Image: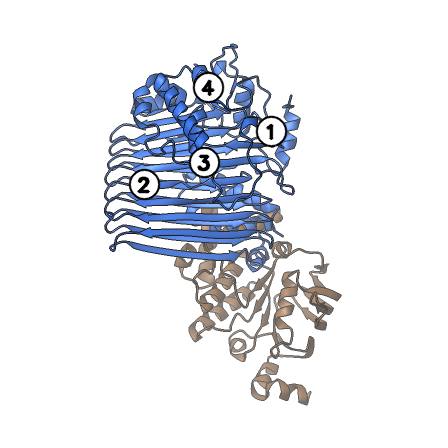
Chain colours: A brown, B blue
Amino acid sequence: MLKIDNLHVALEDGTEILKGIDLEVGVGEVHAIMGPNGAGKSTLSKVLMGHEDYLVTAGSVLMDGEDTAEWAIEERAHKGIFVGFQYPIEVPGVNNADFLRLALNAKRKAGGEDELSKDEFAPILDAALKSAEAPGAWTDRDLNHGFSGGEKKRNEILQMFVLQPKLAVLDETDSGLDVDALRAVARGINSFRGAGRTVVLITHYQRLLDLVEPDKVHILADGKIVRSGDKSLASRLEAEGYDGVLAHG
Amino acid sequence: MPDTDDDTIEQLNQEAYKYGFTTAVDAVTLGRGLNEDVVRAISATRHEPEFLLQFRLRAYEIFLKMPEPDWAALNYPGIDYQDIQYYSAPKTAGERKEPTYDSLDEIDPEILRTFEKLGIPLEEQKALSGVAVDAVFDSVSVATTHQQKLFDAGVIFCSFSEALEQFPHLIERWLGSVVPTADNYFAALNSAVFSDGSFVYIPPHVRCPLELSTYFRINNTDSGQFERTLIIADVGSHVSYLEGCTAPQAKRTQLHAAVVELVALDDAEIKYSTVQNWYAGDKETGEGGVYNFVTKRGACRGKRSKISWTQVEAGSSITWKYPSCVLLGDDSVGEFYSVALTNGRMQADTGTKMIHIGKNTSSTIISKGISCDKSKNVYRGMVTIHPKAENARNYTVCDSMLVGKECSAHTYPYIDVRVNSAQLEHEATTSRMSEEQLLYLRSRGLEEEDAIAAVVNGYAKDVLEVLPLEFAAEAQKLLALKLEHSVG
C-alpha cells in the first residue's frame, strides 16, 4: 500500500529534516509513528500530503506501487491520500457541508465520476456524520471557523469519512481532545480501519493506542526510524521514555 | 474597423478580459471636444425640452468653474476633456438619425449579438426570465425587455430618453434632486453632457414583479459614457435594481462619469446592486482601461424608507465611487455592501457616505477589499450624524485582504457625530490571503483555482449573499476569474 524508501527531505534553506526513512504499511494495517518533539513526524505527514515547502532530496514514496513524487497536493487527495492536520485551518465564510461536497466532487471528477448534487450528497454526508459521531449542526457552520481545538480535530475525521481515502495519515489527531472526544475519534478510526482502509497514526501518547490497537509501532528520532515493533513498544515508551527505550536498544 | 467575426471574439474570450471585443456598428457621433455648442448639440440631437437644455447649460457653467478633485488616493495622468467624444449613438437599421428604437427589428443585428455574447439576450423569447433588462450601448438605450409585464404592474422602466418624452414632469421634478449639479466635478460634467440611462418609477404600494437591470456597454473606444439613472420608489413600494458594465479592451483610456439618483418615499425600499467589470487596462503596464468616476446617491426621504447599495467592483483602471445614503426620513435605513477587487495596476478609491439627519436612522457598512499584484485599494467612508438625528446608529465593518507583496490597501474612515444619543461601531481588519488556507483546501482535493475561489468568496460572503440570486453566482465566478492569475 504505502512504501517509503530511504526518504530524505530538506527545507529550502537546505536544513535536512528526514534522513532516510524506510517504512512499509500494508493494506488495512494501522501503524503508529511516535517520537520526541522535533524528530520529523509532522514533516513526514507534510511530505505525504505533497507540501511544496518540503523538498524530497533522495528516496521515494510509493503508493500502490506508483511513485508519488510528481503528484500535486490535490492529485494526492484524488488518489486517496488524506492527511488529518495537527492544526486544521479555519476558512471563514465557507460552509462546512458545501466544502465537503466540493471536495468529494473534485475527487469524483478526477476519477471520471459524475459530480453529486446537493440531494445526492445528503445521504453520504449523513452517513459520514454518523461514523464520525459529529453533530449535524456542524454542517451549518463554516469550515473550522470558531470550532474549538477538539472540534477541529473531529471535523477532520468527518472529512475523512466523506472522502473515504485509501490511506489516512492522522497527525496528532488525538492531542487536545477530552476523554469523550478521544473515544469518539478512536471509534471512528476503528470503523474506518474495519472497512479495510490503511491508517498511519502520528501520536505522542499511548492513550490513543489503547483504543486503536496498532499493527506496528515505529519510533522516529532525528529524521530516521530507529525502532519498530508491535504495540508493546508503545507501552515501553510510556514507562521508560524515549531516552530509556533508545538507550537499551 | 475592428474585426468581429466569431473567431476573433472567440479568441478574445480566451483572454483574461473576455468582454474586450468591439462591435463594428455605424455610429452617430459629435466628434471630440467639449464646449457650449456640444452641450447644445447633445440636447438638440435628442429633441429635449427647454428645461433640460437649461439644466445642462447651468451644469456646464458650474463645471467650468470647478477644479478637478485631487483628494482621492489615485494616481493618473490628467484627463484631456477635449479629446473625448461626448456623444456616440449607433445608427438604426433604417438609417434614421435619432437613436430611438420602436422595435428590435430596427437595431443593428450586431448590437443584438453583442449583448447576447455578454449573456444578455434582448429578444423577448430568449430574455432572462425574472429580470427586465435595459440595454445601453455607448450613449443610447437600445432595448428594454419585459415591457408589458412591467406596464401591467404600473411600473415605469424605460430609457431616460423615453421617460423624457412620456413623463417629462417626473424628470423635471426629480432630476438633480439628490445629486445637485454642483455636487462635484464629475457630477457637473455628467449633468452637462449625459446622454441616455435608465428611468424607474414604482407607483405607491407596488412591489416590482421583476428584478430590473441595466446593462451598460461602452463600444466606441473614443467615447466617454455619461449616463444618468433615476429611480423613484413611491410610498410603500419596493424595487430591486441591478447594473452590469463592460467595455472593449482599448489602449486609450475611456472616461465613464455616471450619476445615479435614488429616491425612496415613506416605507419604500430600493435595493441597488452593481457588478462592475469595465476593462481594467493592461495588467503589466496599466495602459488603457476605464476611468470610472461615478456619483451614486440615494435619498431616504420618507419615514421608514430603506436604500441598500451592493457593489462588486472588479474592473476599471481607476474607480472613484462612493454610493451614499442621505437618511432624511425618521427611522430610515441605509446600507452599503461592497467587494472591491483590484489587480494588475488598478486603483480603486471607493466607499460610502451615510448622512444621518432623521431620528432613529440606522446604517450598515460592510466593505471587503481585495488587492492583488501591484494594485491599490482604498476604502474611504464617511458617517455623519446631524444634531437632530437622535438615536442614530451605524455599524461599519471594513476588511482588507492582500494577495501578494506589491499591492496596498488603505482605509480612511471619517466620522462626524453631533448628537450624544448616537451609537457607532467600527471594525476593521487587514489580512493576507493565507497560503495555509489554500494548501488546506487543496489537500482535500480542490484545484488551486477552486481553492482561491472558495477562500475569496468566503471572505466576501457577507456581501455576495445580499446580491440578487441570479447575479451572486456570476459575481463569484468573476472574482475567481480575476484572481486566478494573481495568486501563486
Q: Chain of mark 2?
A: B
Q: Marks 4 and 3: which is nearer the front?
A: 4
Sequence order check, earlier mark of 1 and 3 = 1
Look at the numbered discs 1 and 3 and tell me whether their residues touch, using CB distance below 8 Å.
no
Q: Mark 2 sits on what residue?
A: B326
Look at the numbered discs 1 and 4 and tell me whether their residues touch, using CB distance below 8 Å.
no
Q: Mark 1 sits on what residue?
A: B21
Sequence order check, earlier mark of 2 and 1 = 1
Indicate the amino acid at tag 2: Val
Rendered location of residue B73, percent (x, y): 51, 46
Indicate the amino acid at tag 4: Ile
Sequence order check, earlier mark of 4 and 2 = 4
- Element carrying mark 4: helix
Of residues B411 and A200, the one drawn nearer to the viewer in this rendering: B411
In the picture, the disc for residue B294 is 3
Q: Marks 2 and 1: which is nearer the front?
A: 2
Q: Mark 4 sits on what residue?
A: B42
Indicate the amino acid at tag 1: Phe
Both marks 4 and 2 on one chain: yes
